[in-house]
Image (tube, grey):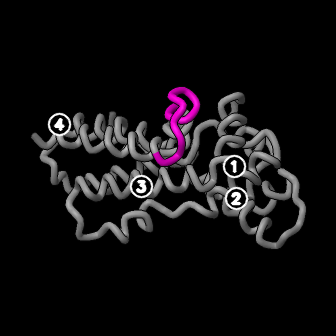
Amino acid sequence: MNKNYTETGRTLQKQKTRNNILTSAKKLLQKGKDFTLEDIAEDANISRATIYRYYSSVDVLSLEAGLDWQTKSPEEVLEPLNGLNTQQTILGIQDYFNNLAYNNEKAFRKYLSHAITTNSEEGKRGARRVKTLSLALQNNNLNLSEEDSQKLIVAATTLMGVEALIVTKDVCGLNNETSKSVLNWALEQMLKGILS
């Protein structure tokens, strides 16, 4: 897995297009007016065919734009964690994304249910957790190989966000507090194992 995969080539272009669409949707949402996918395509200066590859309905685009509006950029997530050691930073990242998921659970569940049942680009979500963790590990303070750093990013990502919430609550039957506690414990244990 190449660390720069999401920052190069076709993947970067797809992410830029997706971000452009979300920016236009947020701009129109702020105006408080109803809009169509065609309105977004025109505002984003992309074709109607392109927007339909990314979003099959204005409802899911509006929902994602609303969630995106509330979600900090990777740099903003890391800002208050500046000065902490790498382990504390990773746990802080988990705390941010888990609190975001729990505080917006209904919206995330609704968006996720739609995203996983479609074949369009909208199922390929923003990957902010991956980017935030990548930025946190870019100095390689844990002395991991590139391959092990990428594995840590993937493993840590599975312990945060709406997907982890769904597994711990729906599959394991935990309440919010216990769910957060177990996910935090799991990441702490994983990091202890890596650091020993």
What's the residue type where badge 2 is placed? Answer: Gly
Task: State the CA–CA distance, disc 3 to disc 1.
Answer: 19 Å
Q: Is residue 182 magenta?
A: no
Q: Is residue 174 magenta?
A: yes
Which residues, given as a range, are shown in magenta?
Answer: 167-177
Q: Measured along the vertical axis of the image, is residue 27 above or below residue 166?
A: below
Q: Is the residue marked by circle 4 packed among few (<14), some (14-19), or many (20+) residues within 10 Å?
A: few
> Residue 85 appears at what percent x and percent y?
20, 60
Q: Determine the image quadrant of residue 39.
A: bottom right
Task: Tell me which secondary structure the magenta stretch mostly adopts.
Answer: helix
Q: Is the residue marked by circle 1 packed among few (<14), some (14-19), or many (20+) residues within 10 Å?
A: some
> Residue 10 appears at what percent x and percent y?
51, 41
- Answer whether labels 4 and 1 touch (C-beta < 8 Å): no
> Residue 97 appears at what percent x and percent y?
48, 53
**Mark 4 or mark 3, which is nearer the start of the sequence?**
3
Task: State the CA–CA distance, disc 3 to disc 4.
Answer: 20 Å
Answer with left or right where residue 39 lies relative to residue 3.
right
- Residue at disc 4, secondary structure: helix
Task: State the CA–CA distance, disc 2 to disc 4.
Answer: 38 Å
- Answer whether labels 3 and 4 touch (C-beta < 8 Å): no
Q: Is the residue marked by circle 2 packed among few (<14), some (14-19), or many (20+) residues within 10 Å?
A: some
Answer with left or right where residue 153 lies relative to residue 102.
left
- Residue drawn 64% across the image and 63% down it: 69
Residue reaching furthest to the left: 196
The quadrant of the image that shows the N terminus is top left
- Answer whether labels 3 and 1 touch (C-beta < 8 Å): no
Q: Which residue is mark 2?
A: 66
Q: Which residue is mark 4?
A: 193
